[in-house]
């Protein structure tokens, strides 16, 4: 093989690899993105200012809405919880336009120590709430220290893309005693 042929093959290989990386970054597989580790990492990046596009100032650029756009999230249990014991918070999720319970939504939650967006001290990865029927979902957790915590609650209605969780986000305050 001649020198030009080898250079052409190497150049073509580098170009193909670059295109693959670019396409992979812009078309992230939704299932791999929804794993708890990836979801946790994605949320931390977006909340701290590292958006998926690499620009913007995270929460300052309104990645998440101030109140859920498609749903209503109601807290059906006490927000005062005990330290060191398994605790559960029951949420009722309703369709905002019909006020009917959302029975087949995905509820993804993360718990932050402190006020919303103040510490980014997340207690483990994000996880799914358990659907107990009739629009009710249970979030179970154990808090290790007394204080204020934030339950970052994201709703993905059935049939909506996973990006809808950014439009259906609500922070719920918890007091651990």
Image: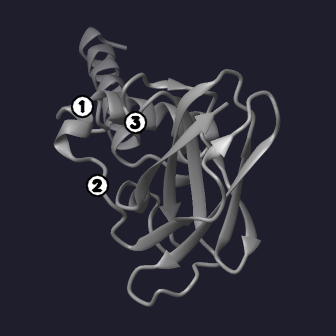
Q: Is residue 116 left or right of residue 138?
A: left
Mark 2 to mark 1 CA distance (whole Å) = 22 Å
| Quadrant where the image shows the C terminus | top right
Look at mark 2 in the image and give the residue it sits on: 66
Query: Is residue 127 positioned above or below 101 on the image?
Result: above
Q: Which residue is at a point 17% across and 35% down the rendered structure image?
A: 56
> How is this picture coloured?
one colour
Helix, strand or loop at mark 2:
loop
Q: Which mark is residue 54?
A: 1
Label 2 vs 1, first from the N-terminus: 1
| Quadrant where the image shows the N terminus | top left
Label 2 vs 3, first from the N-terminus: 2
Q: Is residue 67 left or right of residue 153?
A: left
Q: Could you classify mark 1 by the number of other residues whose Cα lies within 10 Å: few (under 14), some (14-19), or many (20 or more)?
A: few
Q: Position of residue 65 (x, y in %)?
A: 29, 55
Q: Position of residue 75 (x, y in %)?
A: 57, 62
Q: Which residue is at a point 67% across and 71% down the rendered structure image?
A: 136
Helix, strand or loop at mark 3:
loop
Q: Which sits in the foreground, 99 or 58?
A: 99
């Amino acid at each position: 093989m001649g020198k030009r042929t080898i250079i052409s093959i190497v150049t073509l290989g580098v170009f193909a690899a670059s295109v693959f990386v670019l396409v992979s970054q812009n078309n992230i597989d939704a299932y791999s993105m929804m794993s708890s580790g990836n979801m946790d990492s994605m949320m931390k990046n977006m909340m701290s200012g590292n958006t998926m596009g690499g620009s913007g100032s995270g929460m300052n650029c309104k990645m998440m809405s101030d109140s859920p756009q498609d749903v209503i999230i109601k807290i059906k249990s006490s927000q005062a919880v005990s330290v060191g014991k398994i605790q559960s918070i029951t949420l009722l999720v309703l369709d905002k336009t019909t006020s009917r319970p959302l029975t087949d939504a995905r509820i993804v939650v993360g718990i932050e120590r402190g006020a919303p967006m103040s510490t980014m001290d997340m207690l483990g990865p994000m996880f799914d709430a358990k659907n107990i029927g009739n629009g009710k979902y249970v979030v179970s957790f154990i808090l290790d220290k007394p204080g204020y915590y934030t339950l970052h609650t994201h709703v993905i209605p059935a049939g909506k893309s996973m990006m809808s969780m950014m439009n259906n986000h609500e922070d719920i305050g918890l007091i651990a005693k």
